[in-house]
Image: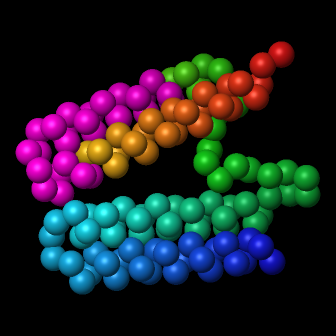
Amino acid sequence: MREWARGIAVGLIALVGLWVAATTHGGLLHYLGFAVALLAIFLCFRLIARAYDGPGERTPLIPVPASDGGRQGLGAMAALLGLVGLFVAAGSHGGGGTWIGLLVALGAWLYVFRLIAASFGTRH
């Protein structure tokens, strides 16, 4: 029942994000509304995928590669994406591009920290 409530809440967040994007014309809120809606839709698909897991099998909501090499490679790509986000934010000189670049950098680096946490969980 908790998964249903979580799915409904995430679906409502996606609708609110789309409503914000539709009612604002340009600027930070327009792009932020689309970003929130996109992330919420991604999370809804992850919740659907988790519903079809076998008994005792639970896929994480945020995917993490099982191998050390996969985590390191994906972490390097996410860190580079964060740097690109910062370069976009610095080159935008204000406006929506600045905030989108900062949000991309923040999301990418939070994912890097998630990969680091997963690596500590597999130490022998």
| Magenta region includes residue 49 | no
Q: How many marks?
A: 0
Relative to the observer, which residue lies in front, 124 or 72?
124
- Percent position (x, y) of residue 64? 63, 38
Could you tell whether 120 is left or right of 78 in the image? right
Relative to the observer, which residue lies in front, 75 or 86?
86
State the residue lying farthest toward the front: 94
Range of magenta residues: 74-100
Identify the residue at horizontal 51%, vertical 23% (top origin). 73
- Percent position (x, y) of residue 18? 36, 77
Q: Is residue 48 above or below residue 61?
A: below
Identify the residue at horizontal 74%, vertical 50% (top origin). 59
State the residue lying farthest toward the right: 55
Q: Quadrant of the C terminus?
A: top right
User: What secondary structure prevails in the magenta region?
Assistant: helix
Q: Is residue 65 above or below residue 93?
A: above
| Magenta region includes residue 80 | yes
Q: Quadrant of the N terminus?
A: bottom right
- Asked which quadrant contains residue 36, the reply is bottom left
- Asked which quadrant contains residue 120, the reply is top right
Could you tell whether 87 is left or right of 39 in the image? left
Identify the residue at horizontal 65%, vertical 31% (top origin). 117
Q: State the scheme by which the image is colored.
A: rainbow
Could you tell whether 33 is left or right of 56 in the image? left
State the residue lying farthest toward the left: 93
Q: Is residue 52 above or below residue 79?
A: below
Identify the residue at horizontal 60%, vertical 19% (top origin). 69
- Percent position (x, y) of residue 84? 27, 34
- Asked which quadrant contains residue 119, the reply is top right
